[in-house]
């Protein structure tokens, strides 16, 4: 068993090594410049059309607003709490700066994915709109690239069970047991039943729950974080200065923190940024393909807000709490570091903020990724696989909640990274389409 773990660790290190991180960040940079910073210039306008997108009479399954909330339900997860803490623990405060950079360029990647998802989506034999990397590879690049589309769908269908299901269920069960001493079996049963109520209703019910739950949980978490941040108001300038300075000079050893070089800040900042917002992995466009819209560019602008909200807002809140509280130098890591930071600043309730945040974030991730995996499986096997896939998905939740997931996590981590490769190839090859569609939109906008 140890030998298998060692081999999988080596494979994971290669898949998520410098080459992959350079590709993910590099394509974001390329698209940002190719779009002439369109994504950065249109953030406010994107918020306006997101608000307008709460209702729509266009063709599709869910409103543009619901599409973003569904994507965010899968994106905002344990990475926003435990992942940020890990980035700081391993890369120092400077890692947060590189998370910001990754997010700013990742907005262009997420925009491009959604543009292609709408442009090349299809209607399946149940009358539902389906799309994502597998469809824009097949329909945008042609039949000779269908093997690449199938590769993405295969990786996505199976990776979903790890990163989007069992790992999340395990995080919920562990957090609830640690704080409330509730047996994992009880948590597994409740989590499975709640998930079943939503998932068995398909994309419409998932979207309805996500559009109600995601804004509430995100706002609640940000408010609690701001409570801590403003309690340390005088330290905010120093905290921001530490983040920027450490990004270029590294971080010296202090307290229980061992100290790291600049490369560690870049490596863990970029890696955790990608894990957090999923820009480039190709997951989010699967949700955006179901949006009621006939305008790829407008849905792309809505999609890019997912990266902005996830990393620039939510992850930054966690980071500032950890740094301002002083917990970052304690030597703690992961969720334990986030819990320590909130507990020191909000005695008696801080640990509850982290646990409830983890539970809600993980639960919505299970919902969102169930749809991603289902659509990938449908691409490979047709609509007959939908109900068997949902059943297997629900069966995996209690298994994940009650098991040790070292091997599952490693395999899922590898498959998740492999998902990105077909998607990134498609984004590069289809970038002229992305640039042309955007240019046409701008020209029509100016003419009006």
Image: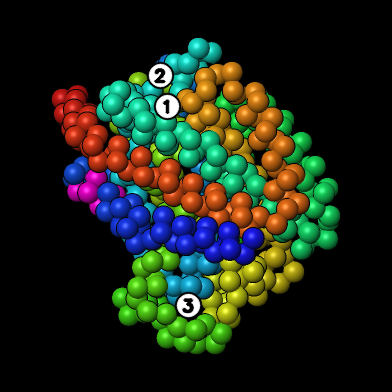
Tell me which numbered mark, 1 or 3, is placed earlier along the sequence.
1
Instruction: State which quadrant residue 92 falls in.
Output: bottom left
Q: Position of residue 349 (x, y in %)?
A: 72, 65
Q: Which residue is mark 2?
A: 122
- What secondary structure is found at the residue carrying circle 1? loop
Q: Which residue is mark 3?
A: 235
- What secondary structure is found at the residue carrying circle 2? strand
Q: Position of residue 337 (x, y in %)?
A: 60, 71
Q: How far apart are labels 2 and 3 at the CA level?
A: 52 Å
The crowding category of the residue bearing disc 3, from other C-alpha atoms within 10 Å (few below 14, some 14 to 19, many at least 20), is: some
Q: How far apart are labels 2 and 1 at the CA level?
A: 6 Å
Specify the segment rendered in magenta.
28-33
**Residue drawn at 33 percent across, 52 percent down:** 24
Residue 393 lies in the magenta stretch? no
Q: Which residue is mark 1?
A: 131
- Horizontal side of 184 relative to 443 (left or right) equals right
Q: Nearer the viewer, residue 291 or 19?
A: 19
Instruction: State which quadrant residue 239 falls in.
Output: bottom left
How many marks the image carries: the answer is: 3
- Horizontal side of 360 relative to 182 (left or right) equals left
**Residue drawn at 64 percent across, 72 percent down:** 340
Location of the C terminus by quadrant is top left
Marks 1 and 2: in contact by CB < 8 Å? Answer: yes
Tell me which numbered mark, 2 or 3, is placed earlier along the sequence.
2
Magenta stretch prevailing secondary structure:
helix
Q: Nearer the viewer, residue 371 or 53?
A: 371
- What secondary structure is found at the residue carrying circle 3? helix
Closer to the camera: disc 2 or disc 3?
A: 2
């Amino acid at each position: 068993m140890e030998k298998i773990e060692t081999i999988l660790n080596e494979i994971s290190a290669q898949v998520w090594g410098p080459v992959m991180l350079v590709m993910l960040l590099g394509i974001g940079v390329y698209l940002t410049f190719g779009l002439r910073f369109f994504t950065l210039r249109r953030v406010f306008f994107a918020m306006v059309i997101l608000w307008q997108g709460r209702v729509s009479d266009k063709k599709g399954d869910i409103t543009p607003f619901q599409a973003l909330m569904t994507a965010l339900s899968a994106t905002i997860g344990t990475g926003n709490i435990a992942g940020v803490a890990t980035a700081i623990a391993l890369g120092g405060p400077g890692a947060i700066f590189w998370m910001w950079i990754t997010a700013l360029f990742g907005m262009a990647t997420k925009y491009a994915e959604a543009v292609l998802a709408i442009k090349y989506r299809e209607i399946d034999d149940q009358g539902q709109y389906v799309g994502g990397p597998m469809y824009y590879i097949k329909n945008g690049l042609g039949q000779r690239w269908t093997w690449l589309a199938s590769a993405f769908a295969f990786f996505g269908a199976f990776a979903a069970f790890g990163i989007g299901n069992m790992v999340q269920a395990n995080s919920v069960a562990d957090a609830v047991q640690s704080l409330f001493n509730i047996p994992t079996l009880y948590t597994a049963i409740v989590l499975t039943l709640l998930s079943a109520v939503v998932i068995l209703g398909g994309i419409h019910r998932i979207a309805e729950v996500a559009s109600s739950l995601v804004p509430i949980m995100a706002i609640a978490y940000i408010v609690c974080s701001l409570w801590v941040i403003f309690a340390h108001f005088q330290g905010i300038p120093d905290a921001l200065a530490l983040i920027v300075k450490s990004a270029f000079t590294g971080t010296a050893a202090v307290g229980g923190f061992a100290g790291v070089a600049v490369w560690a800040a870049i490596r863990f900042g970029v890696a955790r940024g990608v894990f957090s917002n999923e820009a480039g992995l190709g997951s989010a466009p699967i949700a955006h393909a179901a949006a009621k819209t006939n305008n790829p560019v407008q849905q792309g602008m809505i999609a890019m807000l997912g990266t902005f909200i996830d990393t620039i807002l939510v992850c930054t809140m966690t980071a500032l709490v950890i740094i301002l509280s002083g917990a970052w130098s304690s030597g703690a890591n992961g969720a334990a570091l986030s819990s320590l930071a909130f507990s020191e600043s909000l005695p008696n309730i801080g640990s509850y903020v982290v646990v409830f945040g983890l539970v809600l974030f993980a639960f919505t991730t299970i919902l969102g990724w169930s749809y991603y995996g289902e659509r990938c499986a449908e691409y490979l096997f047709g609509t007959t696989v939908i109900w068997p896939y949902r059943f297997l998905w629900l069966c995996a939740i209690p298994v994940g909640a009650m098991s040790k997931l070292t091997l599952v996590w490693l395999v899922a981590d590898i498959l998740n990274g492999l998902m990105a490769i077909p998607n990134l190839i498609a984004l590069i090859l289809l970038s002229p389409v992305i640039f042309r569609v955007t240019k046409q939109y701008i020209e029509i906008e100016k003419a009006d």
